[in-house]
Amino acid sequence: MSTYTIVVIGALVLAALAAIVLLAASRRRDTRDAVGYLSRETRRRDSGSVSEGAEELRGRAYEQSAVLARSGGADIVPAPSAAPVAFVPPDPETLGVTRRQFLNRSIVGFMVMSLSGFGAACIAFLWPSTSGGFGAQITVGAAEDVRQRIRANSGFLYVPEGRMWVTEYPQTAVEKGKSAYSSVLHPMLEAGFAALWQTCPHLGCRVPECKTSQWFECPCHGSQYDRVGEKKGGPAPRGMDRFPGTLDARGNLVVNTGQIIQGPPIGTNTTGQEAEGPNCIGGGHS
């Protein structure tokens, strides 16, 4: 038997027990409060009868006495007359918190805690990470080591902690790339790399590499990009989005995944790379 089934059965048993308790309590209350109504003739006859003692109970008081007797209580004894006492407001500390106040404060407190938790979660999601991982500065490795890893993987290097692809950018295309891309990306171009976000700008699918064509090809709707993320075909509205980066003082490639640069517009072709083999998703380009 699964844990879910046990939990459901337990909940049903508790609900049944709660229903039984409520039913029994309501029946006891109905019995205790069962005070009838006398007819006008009965009340007139009772008022005209002679009581045996000044303290004899009549009417509703007598019925309440009978109810108490049935439930094990004593007869109602009329309280002796006494002079009225001036009302003194109760001390708030002595009175404490009423049930209504407790419930209202509990509901408000629960809502405040829920909204605070939701707001904190939203802020944590949107706040850029500074401790590593996506949204932070990621050190991919020494530039020469990164270049060797790219070539060992047939032209593509996936960095999971940054959700990005790192590829080589041809040195012969750097000047053309500077005229097509924002100056924020120039240090990355000069270092000879392109850091591309793995998400397709069409509908957000993860874009894999195609080692035969040496392109990125989206399996969802067939969008195609060359090795540096410039659009070659498909329904995507632009090239792949990318991250800026630079080489630090020790020659390590550092990529800022907290800043996403929108991909180049359709028609951008700084490297002139065409498909180098069969496409993985579909042939040709627009």
Image (tube, rainbow, N blue to C red):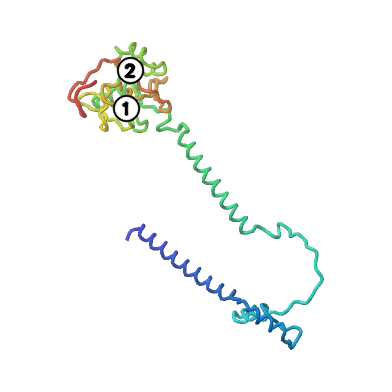
User: Can you see residue 74?
Assistant: no
Dot label at residue 228:
none
- Direction from residue 54 to residue 130 in the image, left or right: left
- Answer with the quarter of the image where residue 52 lies: bottom right
Q: What residue type is disc 2 on?
A: Gly
Q: Is residue 214 above or below residue 107?
A: above
Q: Are the residues flagged by discs 1 and 2 in contact, CB closer than 8 Å? A: no
- Answer with the quarter of the image where residue 39 lies: bottom right
Q: How many marks?
A: 2
The crowd level at tag 1 (other Cα within 10 Å; few <14, some 14-19, many 20+) is: many
User: Can you see residue 243?
Assistant: yes
Q: Is residue 83 above or below residue 163?
A: below
For the N terminus, the quadrant is bottom left
Which callout, 1 or 2, points at the residue further toward the start of the chain? 1
Along the line of sight, the residue nearer the viewer: 71 or 31: 31
Q: Which residue position holds label 2? A: 192
Q: In the image, residue 271 lies at what x, y percent? A: 28, 15
Q: Which residue position holds label 1? A: 165
- Direction from residue 33 to residue 219 in the image, left or right: left
How far, Cα to Cα, is label 1 from label 2?
Answer: 14 Å
Give the residue furthest to the left. 278
The crowd level at tag 2 (other Cα within 10 Å; few <14, some 14-19, many 20+) is: some
**Residue shown at the point (80%, 73%) measured from the top left:** 82
**Residue shown at the point (57%, 53%) measured from the top left:** 106
Q: In the image, residue 47 lies at what x, y percent? A: 71, 82
